Image (spheres, rainbow, N blue to C red):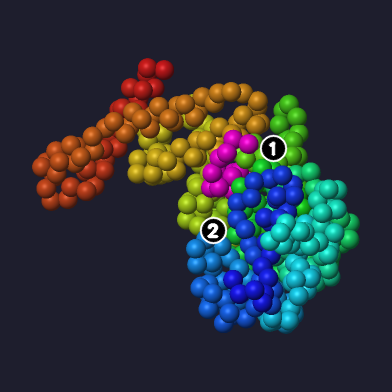
Amino acid sequence: MVPTYKTYVVGGAVRDALMGLAVKDRDYVVVGATPEQMISAGFIAVGKDFPVFLHPTTHEEYALARTERKTAPGYTGFAFHAAPDVTLEQDLQRRDLTINAIAQDTDGTLIDPCNGQADIKNKVFRHVSLAFLEDPVRILRLARFAARFTEFSIAPQTATLMHQMVESGEVDALVSERVWQEIARGLMEVQPSRMFAVLRECGALKRLMPELDRLLDQTIHTQQHSVVVTEKIRRELDAAAQSGLSLPIRFSVIAYHLASEQQAMELCLRLKLPNEVKELAVMTARERATVHGAAEMSADAIVKTLERCDAFRKSDRFADLLKLYELIHISSHNKDTFTSIELFQGSLEAAKAVNAGEIAAAVAIDHPQNPAQHIAAAVHAARVNAVQAELDRR
């Protein structure tokens, strides 16, 4: 590169290396350069709001050192200034947490004006400056980090700022897509329950996911004992993480406890969830009582459930549904097996063995004028017979 400017590794790569963690991606900040110089050196411009470039060989991101100024509510309300006279220290001062505001020179020297190394050592999340107040995404990011770095605590001053951001309405400016992006990443961390605990403690959860916030105030009463929903969901979310289950399953842990299918759908639509997450979540809320009562169901009712869940075409999604119910059952009752899961698994395999194509061809001959309705009824009947045979063998 042209020797008139310098390049530093910044942010998560430096933080993770200092913590002895594997470094996955490296981000770079370039001090003293212009966009024209970067392009002349072969970099590819990709930044929309401020100058970001991809390295021509490694495709890693290089951003020009910049400062930012708040111009409007929300996380998009910023004006950025990137110029050769912006220093590395000025760039680091605009970052969210001290542990993310450390840079490393090409010779390995660390530049740490915000004492991030001390906070790494003491396991503390601490804001860099009062500019933390200006970007509500920082609440979500901190909550997500809490789910990853489970031994870290939040500095009292930072917690106070988070409360202020909620009370001022800054959090209300977040758009659904950005909220889901951070929630999804936090769900895939090692202890996702901590993310929701942090959001709830500062009041943000009530604004972003009011259904879940209300839910966590409830207590489940049974003949044996009472269980606070907060503890139950915490245990199930973290068990899903420990088992390495997929994002749709982890989110559906929440949907399982919602009051109704409609409430699950409303939450999914408001957060603008991807279809694969939304479909499993809504199905989870709808089929909760059905799956748990499988042992008392007739073969016809079981087949209707499989058809309603589109289990014949989307067997992987139905398998995820059963994984979720099994997780919740084991977490609640501390048992290794769940009869309903095995019953549905066996019933699905038996019903899938029915040759729908052959039945359709035969019915079409007998009912050439209006075959569709007759075919559906005949296939359903054959599946019921197959499932009944499976139940009789048990």
Looking at the image, can residue 286 be seen? no
Q: The disc labelled 1 sits on which kind of residue?
A: Arg
Q: Earlier in the sequence, mark 1 or mark 2?
A: 1
Image position of 144 with respect to 256: above or below: below
160 with respect to 358 (left or right): right
Which quadrant holds the N terminus? bottom right
Q: Position of residue 122 (x, y in %)?
A: 86, 48
Q: Which residues are magenta?
A: 242-259
In the foreground, 333 or 382: 333
Residue beneath disc 2: 273
Q: Quadrant of residue 231?
A: top right
- Who's the residue at 72% across and 44% down the image? 20
Query: How far apart in space, not on screen, are marks 1 and 2 (Cα)?
Result: 23 Å
Q: Pointer 1: what residue?
A: 235
What kind of element bears circle 2?
loop
Are discs 1 and 2 less than 8 Å apart at CB?
A: no
